[in-house]
Amino acid sequence: MDFRDKLILAPMAGVCDQPFRLLCKEQGCDILYSEMVSAKAIYYKNKNTKPLLAMDEREKPFGLQLFGSDPEIMAEMAKRIESNGYSFIDVNMGCPVPKVVNNGEGSALMKDPVLVGRIVEAMAKAISIPLTIKIRSGFDSEHINAPEIAHIAQESGAAAVAVHGRTRQQYYQGHADWSVIARVKEACIIPIIGNGDINTPQDIIDMRAQTNCDGFMIGRGARGNPWIFRDMKYYYEHGELPDKPDIYEVKDMMLRHARLMVEFKGEYTGIHEMRKHVAWYSVGMYDSAKLRSNVNQVETYEELEELLCRWADSAPEKVIVS
């Protein structure tokens, strides 16, 4: 599994479902992750996990991200799902959400390096595909221990480490500290994937220069903007940005996204979940506040199509994403 010089979509819960992943893949994303899945939920055969475990062959290389804190359960569940054909399995050690952290999972693991080693070792020994982890810079500003955690993971069998340059304390506020990613890179010989505040093509150039990281993980910068992967590759190769999508291209992408949502989740759930994506797609665009208000009243694909076509047709000529 090669993570070097790859553009990677971050495993964002509630965002990176299969429809969105497929769109990002088409636009040049190299590696995809699932939304995070509870190992205990798999263990207890919770029916709600089934959609989260789904993978399309077009998504490969594709990693399934698990979260949990019990080494034995984590290893057993990794072994159970390995036969689904994933390219690698990842462990979430960075989620800042209270209900996860308060259960000793996600970024709470940053506080227990010994447990991190036990989890990684047990899982790496249980499966034949690569095991990776995703961490934060530390739990809080007083405990910036990402280099230590990453090195422990490496010595315990991890094949790569993704590092978000914020602490759990920060959630998604403030700025990502790329210097921590640089320190992780210095501490490890396995591939290190940089994450945090990658929002423009120039950001990957700057992150490489400042951290020497191997791969680049794009999170919130991709919401409503699957073109970001295309733009980054074009910029890296040509030194300039491609033309931005005009309002009709954005409208068409939203409708394609909506059709995939309906196909995978049914019309009711698909259209309701599509509302937030429309808000992200339309940020900074013509009459976006009114569009976001109106889309919250939409219940069917036909209503959404009518709304988006009316929105695009009423815009001034050649309106592009800002």
Image (cartoon, grey):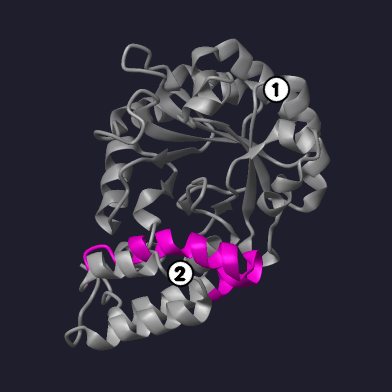
Q: Is residue 280 magenta?
A: yes
Quadrant location, the C terminus: bottom left
Q: Is residue 46 visible?
A: yes
- Which contiguous range is marked in magenta? 259-285
Separation of marks 2 and 1 at Cα, in angstroms:
35 Å
Please state which of residues 235 and 198 is positioned toward the viewer in this rendering: 198
Please state which of residues 254 and 217 is positioned toward the viewer in this rendering: 254
The answer to whether 290 appears left or right of 75 in the picture is: left
Q: Secondary structure at mark 2?
A: loop
Q: Is residue 269 magenta?
A: yes
Above or below 23: residue 173: above
Q: Where does label 1 land, which residue?
A: 121
The answer to whether 40 appears left or right of 290 in the picture is: right
Which of marks 1 and 2 precedes in the sequence? Answer: 2
Identify residue type, mark 2.
Gln
Above or below 161: residue 199: below
Identify residue type, mark 1.
Glu
Across and down, in percent, residue 206 comes to: 26, 46
Across and down, in percent, residue 92 comes to: 56, 33
Count of numbered circles in the view? 2
Q: Where does label 2 land, which residue?
A: 27
Could you tell me which residue is drawn at 48 percent across and 52 percent down?
Answer: 8
Could you tell me which residue is drawn at 76 percent across and 41 percent down?
Answer: 46
Across and down, in percent, residue 45 comes to: 81, 39
